[in-house]
Image (cartoon, rainbow, N blue to C red):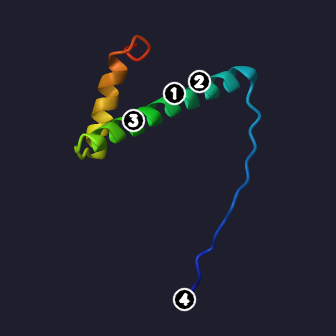
Amino acid sequence: MLSPVHVRYRYRMYPTSRQVQMLAWTFGCARVVFNDCIRLRDEAHKAGEKLSDSEIQTRVITLAKQTPSGSG
């Protein structure tokens, strides 16, 4: 029997200043959403409520749509 072959690649990227801005904006948005999910789960836990991942997702999306930056 042959053993699996593991291949590893290394990549470097050199983004332009505009790409750096967009990456920072994107990761900032992801951080906000992640923190919102943790906050909602903690609040639900304190209230004795158990939320599924899909319920957390639904609530975070609903909250985002209620903010001016998330509605467009």
Q: Residue at x 59, y 82 (%)?
A: 3
Q: Amino acid at mark 1?
A: Cys
Image coordinates for residue 9, horizontal then vertical, percent: 70, 57
Label located before the other in sequence (4 or 1): 4
Q: Earlier in the sequence, mark 3 or mark 1?
A: 1
Classify residue 62 as left or right of residue 16: left
Please say if 20 is above or below 6.
above
Q: Looking at the picture, how far across and down is residue 11, in whole percent?
A: 73, 48
Q: Which residue is mark 1?
A: 29
Q: Is residue 14 left or right of residue 43?
A: right
Q: Left or right of 72: which side holds 21?
A: right
Give the residue number, with chain letter if any, for mark 4. 1
> SS class of the residue under badge 4?
loop
Quadrant of image for the N terminus: bottom right
| Residue 39 percent across, percent down from the top left | 39, 35
Circle nearer the viewer, 3 or 4: 3
Read off the residue under disc 3: 39
Determine which residue is flagged by label 2.
25
Out of 72 and 8, give the one closest to the viewer. 72
- The quarter of the picture where the C terminus appears is top left
Rounded to the nearest whole Å, what is the CA distance between mark 3 and mark 4? 50 Å
